[in-house]
Image (tube, coloured by chain):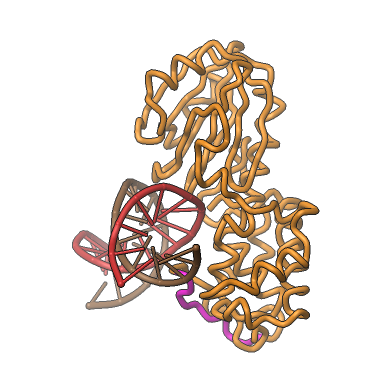
Chain colours: A orange, B brown, C red
Amino acid sequence: MPELPEVESVVQDIVPFVVGKRVKKIEVLSPRIIQTDEKKFLKEIIGSVISHIERRGKYILIYLANKKILVVHLRMTGGLIFTIPEKSSSHSYVRVRFVLDDKSELLYVDSRTLGTMHLIESKEEIQGLHQLGPEPLSEEFSVEYLERLLKRKKGSIKGALLDQRNIAGLGNIYADESLFFAGILPNREPSSLTKKEIGKLYQGIRKVISDALQEGGTTFRDYRNGKGESGQYQERLKVYGRNKKECVKCGAEIQKTRVAGRGTHFCLKCQK
DNA sequence: ATAGATTCCTGGCTGC
DNA sequence: TGCAGCCAGGAATCTA
């Protein structure tokens, strides 16, 4: 499940190999991925040079020299992998193939085909992208911001963390891990958190995200980076995917329930 | 306005 | 052991 650290890894891996190259050909193997009119999509991208690539939340923004932006969202099982023609056929679930001017290839792979691609002129054209909250590692995301935000939120703290309009890039894995770090139960009402708890949660979000970035993300099932390799952060997960296992901190049994419609992992003894 | 439910999809896991 | 059915969850869309 690509969240911020996984998407960032993908971007860092492909940038050195694709920026500056011209797209020569596109093969669309799963049309449902392409959300823009396909004819227009092909016409505008083929022949254009990739000028730079950035990540915003879980979105990948591929800027073309013709001022258009190719926006890729990996959703659950998507990935972008750079490869050469000799190795291209070894990759499974290729849904879109971008052939570059030096014959190298950028593959969009996605077993469940839930990922999306849009070709746009400005970010406002995609609501989810336009409405994104601050990046968790940016200055804009401060303890004060988090305090102000949580004061007015209903529902669960986990739901608030997953809402991309509040903070950009957290998904199910890092939401659970951040709450474990902070010692806060996922179903707590956001406005019930003390100032101290919010401080700890803020610290947890920053730590979990930056540690996962360092480890090249988490490969729980499907995730691969831009070179087709696994991440390493799964070895450092404290609660996610550890249902009925011993808590690494206190030895109690890790619980799994459903909060905000998502499988949610926590330690009843360490989180209050 | 906002929170929760539903939908998309397929590989892998669970349980009978 | 085999296989039907459930589960995984990001975000758009719906419903209350």
Residue drawn at (69%, 29%) of the image: A15
How many labels, in total? 0
- Residue A254 colored in magenta in the image: yes
A23 or A68, which lies in front? Answer: A68
A164 or A29, which lies in front? Answer: A164
Q: Is residue A28 above or below residue A264?
A: above
- Residue A75 colored in magenta in the image: no
Q: Residue furthest right?
A: A139
Residue drawn at (71%, 76%) of the image: A182
- Residue A95, x across and y down, in percent: 42, 32
A183 or A89, which lies in front? Answer: A183
Q: Which residues are magenta?
A: A251-260
A8 lies left or right of A110: right
- Residue A233, x across and y down, in percent: 67, 57
- Residue A168, x across and y down, in percent: 63, 53
- Residue A84, x across and y down, in percent: 58, 21
Q: Is residue A129 above or below residue A18?
A: below
Residue drawn at (57%, 43%) of the image: A130
A207 lies left or right of A108: right
Q: Is residue A159 above or below residue A48?
A: below
Residue drawn at (58%, 71%) of the image: A153
**Which image quarter is the C terminus of chain A in?**
bottom right
- State the image quarter where residue A92 is shown: top left
